[in-house]
Amino acid sequence: MKGRVFMTANTVHTDRKKHRKSGGMQSPDFLMRHPVFSVTIILLSIMIFGILAYFVLQKGSLVKWDLDVVNRMHAVALSSPEWIKNVMLAGDYLGKQGYIATGVILGLYFLIKRFWKELFMVIVLYAGQVILFLGLGNFFARQRPVFTENIGIVISYPSFPSGHMMSAVIMFGLLAYFIVPKISSWAGKTAAILLAVFLVFFIGYSRFFMGAHYITDVIAGIALGVAWVTLVILSIEMISGKVVKENEKEK
């Protein structure tokens, strides 16, 4: 009898591994298998965000440096060719409309596939991003850079931390986390990760180039986005892992 139960458990485990390998984009459970690495990333990201937040609240030398850098960047941006301005404007659409489209597509995909863990990740990450952005933005209430001549649409809501950067990290972080494990070659994996990182920094640079954010807004948005993505994925993977183990014990 014990032998049959053992064989059944092994069969279930093997079937699950086969399903996860061929069943489409699913969480690789990488963060759950490397909790020390995951927690380190969360703590470092929160530390970076906290340091920047402190200086923003103090309005000290870093803020003055911020203002000088954004003014220099804006002068360069205004004198840039029109095609460069259009490329930078594309970063705005990618970070906003692209983010929304990605969330809808991933949500529908996971819903159709009945991948509940992954669907829950998308829902929590996207809902949390809105809460964090609005809550922290109103708390710090940092005014955006002001210019006599602007590039693109002038935004009035607070600038710290950058909502675009949080969105970019969530969007490309999720895509990389789900897609990279499906790529067989290390060259392909490396290329996919570098592309995701490049697109995140492209969106950040475009926001800075257009004068919509200070450089510290961008960095803080990236740090907060990394902390949030890592925390949510790790938490859901661990909760899901416990549920699976409890179900196996009941069987």
Image (cartoon, helix red, strand yellow):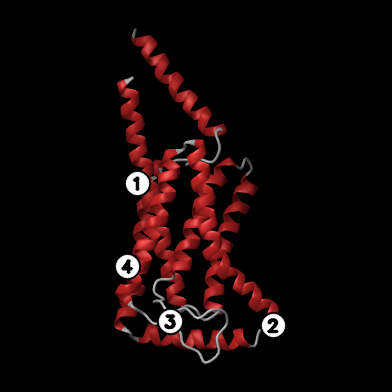
* Residue at the extreme bottom: 148
Q: Residues within 10 Å of mark 1 (few under 14, many from 20)?
A: some
Relative depth, front residue between 63 and 116? 116
Of the image marks 1 and 2, the number of the one nearer the N terminus? 2
Cβ atoms at labels 3 and 1 below 8 Å apart: no
Find disc 4 in the rendering and name its residue.
135
Mark nearer the viewer, 4 or 2: 4
Quadrant occupied by the N terminus? top left
Q: CA distance from mark 1 to mark 2?
A: 46 Å
Q: Which residue is at a point 40% across and 71% down the rendered structure image?
A: 161
Q: CA distance from mark 4 to mark 1?
A: 22 Å
Q: Which residue is at a point 43% across and 74% down the rendered structure image?
A: 217
Of the image marks 3 and 1, the number of the one nearer the N terminus? 3
- Could you tell whether 146 is left or right of 243 in the image? right
Return the mark for residue 235: 1
- Residue 245 place in picture, x, y as percent: 34, 29
Q: CA distance from mark 4 to mark 2?
A: 37 Å
Quadrant occupied by the C terminus? top left
Q: Secondary structure at mark 1?
A: helix
- Residue 241 place in picture, x, y as percent: 36, 36
Find disc 3 in the rendering and name its residue.
144
Cβ atoms at labels 4 and 3 below 8 Å apart: no
Relative depth, front residue between 124 and 203? 124
Cβ atoms at labels 1 and 2 below 8 Å apart: no
- Residue 177 place in picture, x, y as percent: 51, 48
